Image: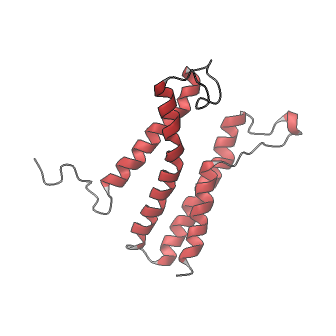
Amino acid sequence: MSELAGKDARTYRLSSIDFLRGLVIVVMAIDHVRDFFLSGATLNTLGDPDTSLGVYVTRWITHFCAPVFIFLAGTSAGLRAARKTPGDLGLFLFKRGMWLIFVEVVVISTAWTFAPMGMAQIGGATLVGLQVIWAIGVSMAMLAFAQLLG
């Protein structure tokens, strides 16, 4: 067995952070597809006394996913600060934040509404819901500017 077994070949990666990030993504994916398989379920599964234990626990644990994901993004940015100048790190975080905002506004809003050119019901405007991915993007952009203060 080689020395690198169980380690990421890139020395600057921490497998534990990548593992936890992947686990959070899997839990969120399970929660998001729940609606497709439980079409008769109530919208508030935590308040329904007839909710199964599995659905309840899955829904409850997802409340920790976004904060953990944002914490890991900040942790990764802090670890990256040791290898980059504040200007380089700021540029990286700003680009990443702008990309996330773009994905939220263009891709996810289109996926929610299925109306990339606007909705007739609201006068041809595009309905944009600013949710978790947008918040992460804005936070990264703000962190990029904070790099310039230090």
16 or 44, which lies in front? 44
The percent coordinates of residue 68 (x first, y second) are: 47, 52
Asked whether, in this view, residue 101 is left or right of residue 93, the answer is right
Q: Quadrant of residue 44?
A: top right
Q: Is residue 64 visible?
A: yes
* Above or below 22: residue 142: below
For this orientation, the residue located farthest to the bottom is 150
> How was the colour assigned to the protein in this rendering?
secondary structure
The percent coordinates of residue 69 (x first, y second) are: 48, 52
- Residue beneath the point at 61% across and 21% down: 41
For this orientation, the residue located farthest to the top is 40
Q: How many marks?
A: 0
For this orientation, the residue located farthest to the front is 49
Asked whether, in this view, residue 146 is left or right of residue 88, the answer is right
* Above or below 85: residue 141: above
Asked whether, in this view, residue 124 is left or right of residue 7, the answer is right
The percent coordinates of residue 135 (x first, y second) are: 62, 55
For this orientation, the residue located farthest to the left is 1
Q: Quadrant of residue 46?
A: top right
- Residue beneath the point at 38% across and 73% down: 82
Asked whether, in this view, residue 24 is left or right of residue 36, the answer is left
- Residue beneath the point at 87% across and 38% down: 122
Q: Is residue 30 visible?
A: no
Q: Quadrant of residue 140?
A: bottom right
* Above or below 85: residue 75: above
